[in-house]
Image (tube, rainbow, N blue to C red):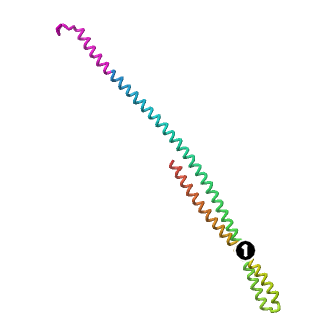
Amino acid sequence: MSARSTSPLTIGLGVLSAILVVLVLIFWSMVGARDRTIQGNKNRSEQVETGAKVMQAQLDEAKAVTDRVQKQLDEAKAQGVELSANRDKSKAQAVELQTQLDRARLISAGFQTQMEEAKVASLKRQGEVEVAQAQTVVAQTQMTKAKSDAAQLQAQLAETRTRADETQKALEIAQAEIARLQKLSVKK
């Protein structure tokens, strides 16, 4: 058969077949692209889901840390209030002891005056030496007791002041801890 003898139907079918092959290849390519897109979307979806789970875990952990920091902050504030109350109590005790010390000093000064008066009286009245000496001994005993009481009160005052200073230092440390925890809480 010659090239002229090929029927137009065969040529038409050949062209149609070629067009169909091209269309099949185009559709095949489109289906492949669609499958890749679906797979890519599926992979992205899984990545987003995994990322969401990780973020949820991090969020839960951050909430736990925030709760823990808030609890520490509340405890530190409570300690600060308690230390402040202890400091105020120590200051009140120091004022009370200072008042007692002042009273003891006045009493001691009174006994000192009485002792000096007794000495003067003994010099003026030689006949009353024994009485004056007895008064002097009594006054000296009372003065010694007053000095002893004053020394004890002075020691108590020093101890109370030391406790007040320690309480003040502890309060400052607690306030610094509160500030640090508040900064941590704000950062979270």
Residue at x-position 63% and y-position 59%:
83
Quarter residue 113 falls in: bottom right
Side of 171 relative to 147 (left or right): left
Q: Residue 128 at x, y = what percent?
A: 82, 90
Quarter residue 145 falls in: bottom right
Residue at x-position 67% and y-position 62%:
89
Quadrant holding the N terminus:
top left
Number of marks: 1
Side of 47 relative to 32 (left or right): right
Residue at x-position 64% and y-position 65%:
163
Q: For residue 73: magenta?
A: no
- Local SS, label 1: helix
Side of 163 relative to 63 (left or right): right
Which residue position holds label 1? Answer: 149
- Secondary structure mostly seen in magenta is helix
159 in relation to 5, above or below:
below
Residues in magenta, as a range: 1-26
Are there few (<14), some (14-19), or many (20+) residues within 10 Å of tag 1? Answer: some
Q: Residue 131 at x, y = what percent?
A: 82, 87
Residue type of the residue flagged with mark 1: Asp
83 in relation to 7, above or below:
below
Q: Residue 43 at x, y = what percent?
A: 42, 31
90 in relation to 19, above or below:
below
Residue at x-position 51% and y-position 40%:
57
Residue nearer the viewer, 86 or 50:
50
Q: For residue 13: magenta?
A: yes
Side of 108 relative to 162 (left or right): right
Q: Residue 36 at x, y = what percent?
A: 37, 27
